[in-house]
Image: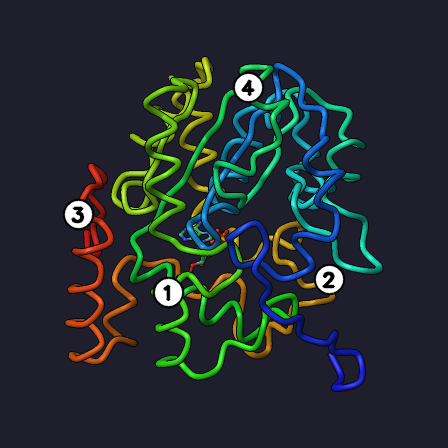
């Protein structure tokens, strides 16, 4: 990407009390009026929590047997459209979702739970929520913001970490996101709440739990095949998911498939940053029943 082609970084905006950039609010009314179908599956996450990984797995679980060429020929952003996004000169996520002809439709969103289009609730859709520990999430989001021009300027790591702690990043507070989705699960049972760290620890077990929730019963061979395809190094090589053609991303600055590990935060946080983060975390998570692991 040459300097001239680089899209302008948008400013961070406050939108209904949550931080966004315009690329995630410009299509707001259309997104809010999205007509979900009862068999749609929403894959919801705070950014950088393993959305692509889980989207890829669910897509293979549904379609690899019946349509094995799908994942070789159709980019993941079309197989699992990103509902919220609207970047100029690219089809909006909502339009891509409307164009999906296969069933079930798999739809990705980073929206905080209060902004999920009401048709998903009205149709009693299944929702897979993926959460990742705050420290690794912050590091991953920092590197992503450095290379993705749909993100406001991240500043240096210390600046970014403060922004993350204060919810001054696109999609707002990690703490609110994971907790409010967790609370919604108590009243809406069709949410499967997953953790990135569990997937890293034992992807077979997590795929089986996912299948249980989705009502799928693939063979052991199929699960092994999907597990292998979904390994970090294999996904990184996959031209249908690498986001190389996404105009807002300059992966020379940081690759989309960056490390794929639990605990990379240790290479970024200073001792002081870690202590301050832990103190602040304790306060913000004091009423939470969620237990995150920062190492496995
Ligand atoms: P890192 O930046 O820590 O490497 P999302 O898809 O929600 O944007 O999340 C991106 C994060 O998930 C990145 O984290 C990316 O490397 C990681 N990821 C993607 N595919 C993965 C896989 N197959 N195994 C482990 N991590 C993966």
Residue 194: x and y in percent read 35, 35
Residue 112: x and y in percent read 49, 43
Looking at the image, tell me whether mark 3 or mark 4 is earlier in sequence order.
4
Residue 212: x and y in percent read 38, 17
Which circle, 1 or 2, is nearer the viewer? 1
Q: Residue at x 43, y 19 (%)?
A: 190
| Residue that badge 2 annotates | 245
Rendering quarter of residue 261:
bottom left
How packed is label 1: few (under 14 Cα within 10 Å), some, or many (20 or more)?
some
The kind of secondary structure element at disc 3 is loop
**Cα–Cα gap, marks 1 and 3:** 16 Å
How packed is label 4: few (under 14 Cα within 10 Å), some, or many (20 or more)?
some
Task: Verify CB contact (< 8 Å) between mark 1 and mark 3.
Answer: no
Asked if ligand 1 lies within 8 A of label 2, the reply is no
Task: Verify CB contact (< 8 Å) between mark 3 and mark 4.
Answer: no
Q: Residue at x 53, y 75 (%)?
A: 146
Which circle, 1 or 4, is nearer the viewer? 1
**Cα–Cα gap, marks 2 and 4:** 31 Å
| Residue that badge 3 annotates | 286
**Cα–Cα gap, marks 1 and 2:** 32 Å
The kind of secondary structure element at disc 1 is loop
Q: Is residue 240 above or below residue 2?
A: above
Instruction: Specify the label residue 166 is tagged with.
Output: 1
Looking at the image, tell me whether mark 1 or mark 4 is earlier in sequence order.
4
| Direction from residue 195 to residue 293 in the image, left or right | left
Looking at the image, tell me whether mark 2 or mark 4 is earlier in sequence order.
4
The kind of secondary structure element at disc 4 is loop
| Direction from residue 239 to residue 203 in the image, left or right | left
């Amino acid at each position: 990407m040459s300097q001239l082609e680089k899209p302008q970084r948008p400013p961070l905006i406050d939108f209904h009390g949550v931080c966004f950039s315009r690329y995630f609010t410009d299509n707001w009314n259309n997104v809010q009026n999205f007509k979900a179908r009862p068999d749609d599956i929403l894959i919801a996450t705070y950014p950088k929590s393993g959305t692509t990984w889980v989207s890829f797995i669910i897509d293979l679980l549904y379609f690899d047997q019946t349509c094995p060429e799908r994942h070789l020929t159709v980019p993941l952003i079309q197989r699992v459209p990103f509902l919220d996004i609207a970047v100029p000169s690219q089809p909006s996520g909502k339009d891509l979702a409307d164009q999906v002809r296969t069933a079930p439709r798999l739809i990705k969103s980073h929206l905080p739970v209060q902004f999920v289009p009401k048709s998903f609730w009205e149709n009693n859709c299944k929702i897979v929520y993926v959460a990742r520990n705050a420290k690794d999430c912050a590091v991953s989001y920092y590197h992503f913001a450095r290379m993705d021009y749909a993100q406001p300027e991240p500043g240096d790591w210390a600046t970014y970490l403060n922004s993350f702690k204060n919810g001054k990043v696109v999609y707002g507070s990690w703490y609110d996101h994971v907790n409010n989705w967790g609370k919604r699960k108590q009243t809406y049972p069709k949410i499967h709440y997953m953790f990135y760290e569990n997937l890293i620890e034992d992807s077979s077990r997590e795929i089986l739990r996912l299948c249980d929730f989705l009502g799928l019963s693939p063979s052991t061979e199929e699960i092994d095949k999907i597990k292998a395809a979904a390994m970090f190094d294999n996904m990184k090589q996959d031209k249908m998911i690498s986001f190389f053609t996404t105009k807002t991303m300059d992966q020379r600055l940081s690759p989309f498939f960056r490390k794929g590990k639990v605990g990379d935060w240790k290479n970024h946080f200073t001792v002081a940053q870690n202590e301050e983060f832990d103190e602040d975390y304790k306060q913000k998570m004091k009423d939470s029943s969620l237990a995150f692991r920062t190492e496995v």
